[in-house]
Image: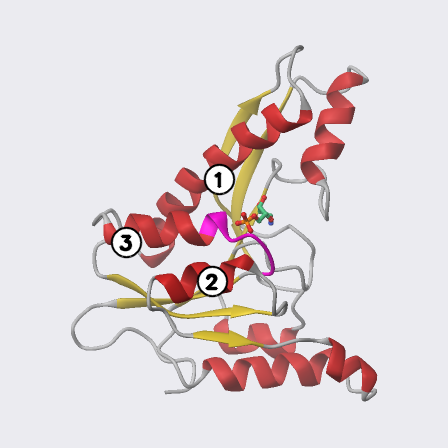
Amino acid sequence: MASGRSDRTGVKHLAVLASGNGTNLQAIMDAIEAGRLPQVRISVVVSNRKAAYALKRAEAHGIPTLYHPLRPYRQAGRSREEYDADLARMLGHYPVDLVVMAGWMHVFTMTFLKHYSGRVLNIHPALPGAFPGTHAIERAYEAFQRGEITHTGVMVHRVPDEGVDEGPVVLQERVPIYPNDTLADLEARIHAVEHALYVRAIALALG
Ligand code: GRF
């Protein structure tokens, strides 16, 4: 089923892509199991890192996993487009209404995105336009210490093209920073907001 959409039962399927710990994946799986995302299933979880704890979380919930590393492509002199084309081909074996990037550390080329036009979501631990790229929480924390910002936030956006952490916003939420916060305090507050926001954004995006 190439880039397949929802089946006749009305069930909608997610492919979740995660490179790391997978707490957002966990929040989505928990929401599904608690009935907070009715008629939604995760058909596959993909990681580019073999050691990603996200894969263990998926296995614990009986969800199929795929491991798709970039390094062998680089070593063989093969391009990102070839990596992305192969990923799209692999996902084509699963029903997928929405591709959910949950801490996926690669930027997609159009070679992948053209298969899922308007159907790719990403979460970023900052507000639209703020701190794109990695270490967004640390950079916001440091900017607060310098008096440059009073708050940060979380956004979920669609991924229309190769831009990093930008695209039409589905949901966003402000997150306060307090003077006595440690970086760990701010990280915990942001992750808690992420987990709730992503579930709501997926429901919205699936319409
Ligand atoms: C989250 O902060 C997400 O916003 C960012 O990567 C992190 C992934 O965390 N894109 P986890 O793997 O879901 O715990």
Of the two numbered discs 2 and 3 in the rendering, the one whose residue sits closer to the viewer: 2
Task: For ligand 1, tell me if the residue under mark 1 lies within 8 Å.
Answer: yes
At horizontal 73% and vertical 42% (from top left) the residue drawn is 135
Q: Which residue is mark 1?
A: 194
Q: Secondary structure at mark 3?
A: helix
Q: Earlier in the sequence, mark 1 or mark 2?
A: 2
As drawn, the label of residue 32 is 3
Find out whether the residues at labels 3 and 1 contact each other: C-beta distance under 8 Å: no
**Residue 71: image location, x then y, percent:** 75, 77
Q: Is residue 142 above or below residue 111?
A: above
Quadrant of res 13: bottom left
Q: Amino acid at mark 1?
A: Glu
For the magenta stretch, what is the residue range? Answer: 19-24
Say whether residue 201 is left or right of residue 17. left
At horizontal 61% and vertical 84% (from top left) the residue drawn is 85
Q: Amino acid at mark 2?
A: Lys
Of the two numbered discs 1 and 2 in the rendering, the one whose residue sits closer to the viewer: 2
Residue 120 visible to an observer of this rendering = no
